[in-house]
Amino acid sequence: MIAKNNKLAVVCCVCLIALFICGCATLPHAGHEMTATQDGVTSPAGQPHALQASVERYRQLAIGFEKKQQLYKAVFMWRVVQKFAPDDRQASYRIRELDLQIRSEADKHFLKGLDNAKRSNFLSARNEFLMTLAYDPNQKGAFESLRSDTLSPGYTIYETIQGDTMRKVAQKVYLDPEKDFIVAYFGELRDDTDLKPGTVLKLPVIKSESELKPRRISGLGSPHVRRVNNKAGAEVHYRKGVSFFLAEDIQRAIREWEETLSLDPEHPNARRNIEKARDLLKKGQLK
Amino acid sequence: MTTTRHQLLRWIELACLALIMLAMTGCALFQPRPFAVVTAQPGDSFSSLATKHLQNPSLGWMIAEMNDIDVLNPGQMLIIPLYPLERGGITPRGYQTVPILTYHKFSHTSKDVVTVTRKAFEDQMHFLKNHGYTVISLDEFFDFLELREPIPRKSVVITIDDGWRSAYDIAFPILKKYGYPATLFVYTDFIIGGNKNLSWAILREMMKGGISIQCHTRTHRYLDRRIGRETFKQYFESIKEELTESAMIIRRQLGTEVKYLAYPYGETNDLVIALLVKLGYRGALTVERESNPCFVNRYRVNRSMVYGNFDLEDFTNNLKVFNSQVLQ
């Protein structure tokens, strides 16, 4: 009998503790802080005028966010209004409308992003995922897609087949079997026995030998780069100019930036850099 | 025997019941709370409220922005959002960008392309303070890139390259005066002490003063190209060594984690980047004169060099914090 009573007491204690904790969770914090949840709100009791003023303030903030096209913040602020004034019709209406608009825009951009990524249009895909987050910052799919490295190709993905060796893979990927040590290093392979068929290797793209060569001072960018378009070629010279500038070789930096302008007269920084560099030369601060 | 077994079973029943109750209360405890309503008390600041409610003092600006106020007065009612309302500063009308400033040398009076005078540096830091810029650390900047934490609208990062002694003699006291964090990228062969170069002892002192010490390779060689008669294999081994050894030396000397690299001369290529990823670097920085959106490649982060002959107008031209380009 006594043992039965003891167990009952234990059960009652557990229930009481649990209920107590539940109660704490649903009550507003003590002191001057109040918390609001989706399910309930506390308002500054006994301050009807202050409350009304606050509601109007948050209404104006919500409208301001809408004007700035920051819909997610706007709907948040309308929810604040609604919590303080549960019968506010404008708040209910705007929350419904904005929720729909946010959902529809976010979904539209996310699907476009996925489609672009599938077709390897990485830049467009990235922009679509960004737009998704602009409408809904907590859209997990867009967030994950942007954080993954699928949108910044700098690797070759190679899946091994029967009979592959590291030299063979190097030949296929880099057209050079001597680069087998790169395959080993990035594939974390000790020797060919580690290379089972179906192994997926993520190997870095390596510039052509000519691009890795020590640069000639007056040399132009590699033919490969120059073929792409004038802007890409201009960028090569621009970067070379920056390198010379950092090495305090201003004359050569200026020559590279002039070459930049000849390929891309609208280059955003080359002209300004030339002016600055000439200015420094004039003042005799540099060689 | 049977009684003991029965007792054991009953205790298990009771334990299960307790667990169910705890799980239920857990659900109630951890339900999402969209916002807190707080009345500001004397002594409260945006930063103290952010510490209390968002567990991050640097998010005080978010409370100010959401309530559309610049100054906090006791008695003021505030709404504090408890989940992110924005990521990466992206809006349909454009996106936030973060300028990263790069310095090399400092001097008392004379200047050249990579040497900024004490007065110019002081004026630039004063300008940032007076015009509402927040200097954030490189860690905060990379949290922003990874869409973890929002950062103030007008955020700037300060970096100093190489390891010249003037970074300690001239820049460090000014940075301390303004309470600005900064990152110093050193190439370890250059840390030899003396009148011109920094020493490990000084670097330790700078670290205590809020400066993060990070990697600028060991010898400051070009990483994106072979040198002299180097074969490709020698080139690869050399750049790998530049990235591993320097980080190891910094770790050994300062006991700090090396997470970032500033490319010598700002130059890189896909192979170097792949190496950095493999070696566990969190990011790397070039000297492309541009501000950074949240989607910049983490291994091609832009930085703007501040030249010795910059006036304040030149300086402000490098402080672009929003790009109004519509993404669609």
Image: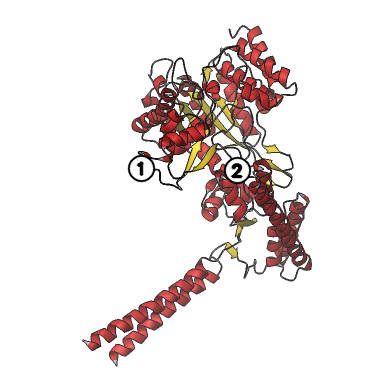
Give the mark, 2 or 1, whose residue is nearer the N terminus: 2
Question: Residue A185 or B52: which is nearer the viewer?
Answer: A185
Q: Left or right of A231: which side holds B170?
A: left
Return the x and y of residue A54 as percentages of the image width and height: 71, 60
Disc 1 target residue:
A193
Disc 2 target residue:
A151
Q: Left or right of B191: which side holds A159?
A: right
Residue shown at 78%/51% (left/top)? Answer: A67
Q: Left or right of A206: which side holds A90?
A: right
Which color scheme does this rendered protein use? secondary structure
Amino acid type of the residue that numbered disc 1 sits on in the rendered structure: Thr
Return the x and y of residue A276 as percentages of the image width and height: 67, 16
Q: Do labels 2 and 1 share a chain?
A: yes
| Residue lying at the far bottom of the rendered structure | A1
Return the x and y of residue B133 as percentages of the image width and height: 62, 36
Can residue B273 be seen in this snapshot?
no
Return the x and y of residue B93 as percentages of the image width and height: 74, 45
Of all chains, the one bearing label 2 is A
| Vertical comparison of A181 with B193: above or below | below
| Vertical comparison of B2 with A144: above or below | below
Label 1, residues with CA under 10 Å away: few <14, some 14-19, many ≥20 = few
Work out how far the residue at label 2 is from the one at label 1, CA to CA, in angstroms: 32 Å
